[in-house]
Image: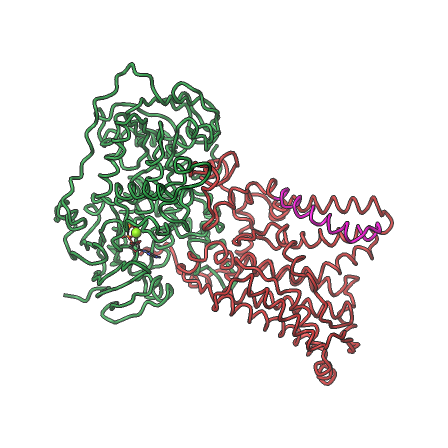
Chain colours: A green, B red
Amino acid sequence: MTTPLLEMHGIVKSFPGVRALDGVDLDVRAGEVHCLLGQNGAGKSTLIKVLAGAHQPDAGRITWRGEPVSLSTPQAAMSLGIATIYQELDLVAGLTVADNIFLGREFSRLGLTRPAEGNRAATALLTRLGHPEIRPTAEVGSLPAAAQQMVSIARALSQDAKLIIMDEPSAVLDNEEVERLFAVMRDLTADDVAVVYISHRLEEIRQVGDRITVLKDGRTVATGLPARETPTREVITLMTGRDIEYVFPERRARPAQDEAPLLEVEGLGLRGSFADVTFTVRAGEVVGLAGLVGSGRSEILETVYGARRAGAGTVRVAGRRLRPGDVAAAVAAGVGLAPEERKSQALLLGESVYRNISISSLARFARGGFLSGGSEKAAAREQVAALDVRPADVDREVRTLSGGNQQKVVLARWLLRDCRVLLLDEPTRGVDVGARSEIYALIRDLADRGVAVVVVSSEIPEVLGLADRVLVIGDGRVLAAEPAGALDEHRVLDLVMEDAAAHGGAAHAPYEGDVA
Amino acid sequence: MSGSTTAAGVGASQEPAGTTAGRGSSRGPGFLAGPVGRNLGLVIALAVLCVVGAITAPDQFLDVDNVLTILRLASVIGVVSIGMTFVIIGGGIDLSVGALVALSSVWATTLATQQMAEDVHWIVMVFTALAVGAGAGLVNGVVIAYGKLVAFIATLAMLAAARGLAEIIANRRTQIVQDRDFLAFFSGDVLGVPTLVIIFALVALAGWVLLNRTTFGRRTFAVGGNAEAARLAGIRVQRHTMWLYVLSGLTCGIAAVMLMARTTTGSSTHGTLYELDAIAAVVIGGTLLIGGRGTIVGTVLGVLIFTTLGNVFTLNNLSSSAQAVARGVIIVVAVLLQMRLATGNFSLGRLGRGPGAPAATGAPAGTVSGGSVPGGPGGTPPGGAPERPQT
Ligand SMILES: Nc1ncnc2c1ncn2[C@@H]1O[C@H](COP(=O)(O)OP(=O)(O)OP(=O)(O)O)[C@@H](O)[C@H]1O
Ligand SMILES: [Mg+2]
């Protein structure tokens, strides 16, 4: 057998209070897609940060093409030919797309930058990823999450690497974009580049993966499993140590048709984003919004919530009309929104888990303005246990949690709050299979208690499995509104694709600077 | 991997240098329209001041000599502000600039230095001032970047120490510059433009090129905007930070030389409160105090606004206290105008998105998605993804 491109042996890494990696082994061969699986907090991101030179291991050996190496800085890893797409979008918001792609490796001569070349090269890379409409001179901070992810991917591709590490790149992408990413990955592996791929979506692993390594609690529990042949059940059991049914909870008998709707949205429109959106949600009902990333689903939720001022239409909660663009009024009427971009829109990273969970329900824990820390923590602990946040320590700073666990904290905040209408934007993004089932059950449970729930998800099976009724959104319009049972994945995709084709790929319009 | 890209540097040598100019054309509005448009608030403020000056003191204000006086006064603090702009964009602050100007001026005018200058050339004095400024900046930089001391504290300590050292060296006496040639050179003019003003113009131009056209400048934005991302991109953040303070110290050295020429002295009281003037100029110039954003043109306008203000007040025989009040008002008004006019680039909403900023503390909402601020967070509406300020 030829020497592997990369071997890691007995890698150990501790943070104050946690041993994130406790003897991990990994070997990656040139030209393969090596998938790294594990529950939230298993240590995947920590491992790849060690590999990227961003963290220093406490113990362990790393060999590159048979030679022992020390990856003491990110530069050291890059100069070997290791490029990394980090889980958190690690971009500089104030710099342009091209500047971010070539940051640290700018096109320059004698220290003078050559922006025209950078812009050209950036456009070439983004075109290869299927996004020629992302302008290289646009400021990264102004782009939606999916476009930012594309910039991160372009960044990694630009490095001419021998090994590209991708930490959950698909979390913010839709099906079509994931397909394109896979095509790029196949090109790369054909050129003998190796890819380490992390994702919580097992279907993806089957589609692109060659071999699997499974991490659990900072240890390698299995390595070198064939990605296509290993049964899903076995993978899940390895990851969780339990036997989990990956199923959606039972739907309750549908609420009577004559029951008055709790949330009524009529003719809602936002200039340049979506138009004429009408739907209703009854108490106890879960309505799903399916569609491509950028189709306007998140904007619809944000407009219902009042975070964006509607240009047209009305939103009614229990028959009362909400003032457009007034979040406080929506909150007072019992509407809650768990936003899509958790890190920038929702989390207080430097604060503890329990404070992040209780922040939206403080009134419940206060008496005469004085907070009772005890009941606050107790309530947070309950949520942490229900969502399986790891480590289950409510005093930890949120910053030190793994990506998926941070997501769970935001979700916990909204589950704790007594909402009548709950708007959930990508509630399971980055969440592992085990916790997903728990989240589905919790959402269903809330609905059964009389909450009207609206869920946006890029994973069509999730929408179909969870919701009672589904609205298919394409390019800011409702393409179909049907009971979930009447739709299947292909039908939804067909609807979306037909619409995109009819509008000349207009599904990506929201990234463009001059459409309005 | 396909050949669609080349590593930076490899592809760099293939084309003639002329391409850099091509950038302006790809940016819609003309090259000049950009900076002016973005700094519209400042331009208006400056114009208003000039109009007030012209009305209240019609004979004196518009006089060529008066204009040159304004520019000459602006030069010294202007040079310091250029260095400060870099430090602040890079996410830091330098409170020691005034003290460094004093220390450099004193060190460069000691008997020993002046003796050496007499034996060799007055350039020795210039070098001494620059070396002292840069050296003290290096100390700041090392302490902050490698010692991990907060910039505010480290430079506050330097402020005290450098001014104290200047007093010790000068023994609290004002040191007269003896060298005629030195004074002749720096107090002269070229085609009617004072040398000091030319130096300021050159420093500002060099600063503009360094910030906008070099890898150093690009990385300064990255280090200030998101230090962790910069580190992961392979930028040596600590070393870069250190150089920013050296740069600031160097501009203090230059300013010291200019001040020595203007006052014909070196003194431990030179540059008093320059740190506040420089920071104020930089901030009203649109540079974010949290780092990651800022422009040289804005800083230059900021300096001009403050100096013109002082001049207008002096011409009208108003007290310096009234001037101080006006200064405060100007800072607030200029920054507000800047935020309104700069097409959302400096909107308040964006501030809330800085690293670690408690973005969600306000509403119980947990989501502050743009609200009614156009171009705020939560994604700019499809209408207008703003481009990076490029001045
Ligand atoms: N900077 C840090 N300080 C303290 N603890 C940390 C830090 N980074 C990670 N950890 C801890 O290390 C463990 C592993 O985290 P890691 O981010 O590697 O998980 P992961 O497998 O990537 O999970 P996810 O699927 O949620 O992204 C977690 O318990 C996490 O809380
Ligand atoms: Mg992770």
Q: Main secondary structure of the magenta part?
A: helix
Q: Position of residue B213 (x, y in %)?
A: 54, 58
- Residue B337 magenta: yes
B320, B134: nearer the viewer: B320
Q: Quadrant of residue A68?
A: bottom left
Determine if residue A162 is in view.
yes
- Reply above or below: A89 against B178: above
- Residue A502 located left or right of residue B153: left
- Residue B188 located left or right of residue B285: right
What span is colored magenta in the figure?
B313-338
Determine if residue A63 is in view.
no
- Position of the N terminus of chain B by quadrant: bottom left
B212, B135: nearer the viewer: B135
Q: Position of residue B386 (x, y in %)?
A: 51, 43
Q: Position of residue A179 (x, y in %)?
A: 27, 43
- Residue A248 located left or right of residue A312: left
- Residue A42 magenta: no
B178, A325: nearer the viewer: A325
- Residue A344 located left or right of residue A223: right
| Residue sitting at the far bottom | B119
A39, A397: nearer the viewer: A397
Q: Residue at x 74, y 65 (%)?
A: B195
Q: Residue at x 85, y 47 (%)?
A: B58
| Residue sitting at the far front | A368
Q: Quadrant of residue B307?
A: bottom right
Q: Position of residue B133 (x, y in %)?
A: 62, 71
User: How many numbered circles does the render carry?
Assistant: 0
Determine the quadrant in which ligand 1 lies.
bottom left
Q: Residue at x 22, y 63 (%)?
A: A23
- Reply above or below: B372 against B61: above
